[in-house]
Amino acid sequence: MGKLNRQLDPTQTGQEAEKLDADLRKRIVGQDEAVQQIINIYQTNIAGMSSPGRPIGNFLFLGPTGSGKTRIVEATAESLLGDAGAVVKIDCAEFQHSHEIAKLIGSPPGYLGHRETHPLLSQETLNQYHTEKLKLSFVLFDEIEKASDALWNLLLGILDKATLTLGDNRRVDFSRALIFMTSNLGAAEMSSILRPAFGFLAGGAERDCAAGVIDERTTEKINRAGVEAARKKFTPEFLNRIDKTVVFRPLGEAELRRILTLELNMVQQRIFVSSKSNPFVFSVTDPAREYLLREGTDLKYGARHLKRAIERSLVHPLSNLIATGQVRGGDLIRVDVDAPQGRLTFFKEAENMPAYAMVQMVDVSLTPVQGTFAAGAAAEPARAANARGSRR
């Protein structure tokens, strides 16, 4: 046996983790730290090095609304399980009183509704999205700060021992689960830190932040504000059971531009899927994109405001055009803007386009779920895209 003195590189990741990393970075904009933390935990699990008797990972995501905290959980499930809905989502606003915990674990014997109460966190619920290839559960406690102390105490056992005892004494195993908790704690403090930079005070920093540039010092202040707010709200034993606490940075204009492209692509997918045998393609001009960006930019509400602007200004008018027969399958629609009227305009550029021609106009690299195009006549564009890829 030869003696080696070869230096190894622990920063490399395996193929599965690299694939997840690339996929998440296509879907999630401006939150590289959160993506990296998920990749680290996932790589540890693949290597079989996760701590025994604990969940695969416990995450606390802090930051302002609309920064992507919930979306990154859905995107991870989307990438690994092929379904953004494969997340057991608990809205903590529904558990502000201690007696409401019965909805999670069921009523114990002797209490009213014992047999009629079906617990939300049963083993069947956790395992419903398992596949033969990947037995992994995603559990999201959304807006955890709104829950009562009873829910936080219930989480102590889940986060530490990966077990939960239901009202009828059945045990639920969370050792194959990723636990995510989101919170808006510290959002007001983060907003006050960013306010001068985002234009409430004039200066060069205004232009930088408008372009999505936030310096390291400001980022450090934002992180500190989120962590300090969490420490004031939660007990030390609760925070001590969390593997990774990530503070999501507010989104600047550069990130919102990339999100706009993602959202327009998802609207195109929606057309392919919901239009069944009548898919069509739309293209958005640069002035129209600028209009949507102006309508959808809001420091307080983040990307959610942009989504609402797209629904209001693009999706609703397109729905009217489809319902009235002005847009049909195979059409190419150009979306422009009427600046004086302050609204988008729609023009039919072509009609009766074949499927292969339509798919050449669509950015399939941003498709969130592989196989989405398989509905109705939209399956043909997917096959055409795959054929082009194989020829390469």
Image: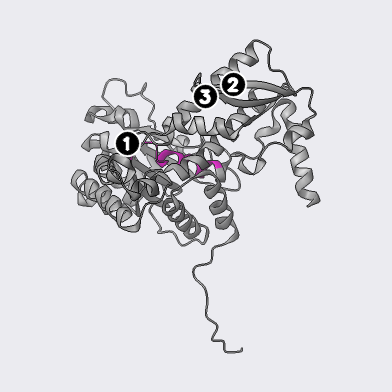
Q: Tell me: 199 left or right of 85.
A: left
Residue 118 rendering spot, x and y as whole percentages: 39, 26
In the image, residue 317 lies in the stretch drawn in magenta: no
Q: Calculate the distance from the C-alpha at mark 1 to the C-alpha at mark 2.
A: 39 Å
| Residue 252, horizontal then vertical, whole percent | 41, 43
Residue indicated by mark 2: 345
Report the Cα–Cα distance between label 3 and label 2.
10 Å
Residue beneath the point at 66% across and 21% down: 347
Dot 2 amino acid type:
Thr
Tell me the quadrant of the picture where the N terminus can be found. Answer: bottom right
Decide: few, some or many residues near mark 1? Use Cα within 10 Å; few <14, some 14-19, many ≥20.
some
Indicate the secondary structure of the residue bearing disc 1: loop
The residue lying at 60 percent from left, 48 percent from top is: 133
- Numbered range of the magenta stretch: 64-78
Q: Residues within 10 Å of mark 2 (few under 14, many from 20)?
A: some
- Sequence-wise, the earlier of marks 3 and 2 is 3
- The answer to whether residue 43 is above or below residue 27 is below
Which mark sits nearer the N-terminus, 3 or 1?
1
Is label 3 or label 2 in front? Answer: 3
Residue position marked by numbered label 1 in the rendering: 143
Q: Position of residue 99 (x, y in %)?
A: 23, 27
Query: In front here: 233 or 265?
Result: 265
**219 and 114: which is toward the camera:** 219
| Residue type (three-letter) at the residue carrying disc 1 | Glu
Mark 3 lies on residue? 339
Q: Is residue 176 above or below residue 354?
A: below
**Residue at image x 75%, y 48%?**
389
287 left or right, relative to 174:
right
Quarter location, residue 366: top right
> Seen in the image, is 28 located left or right of residue 90?
right
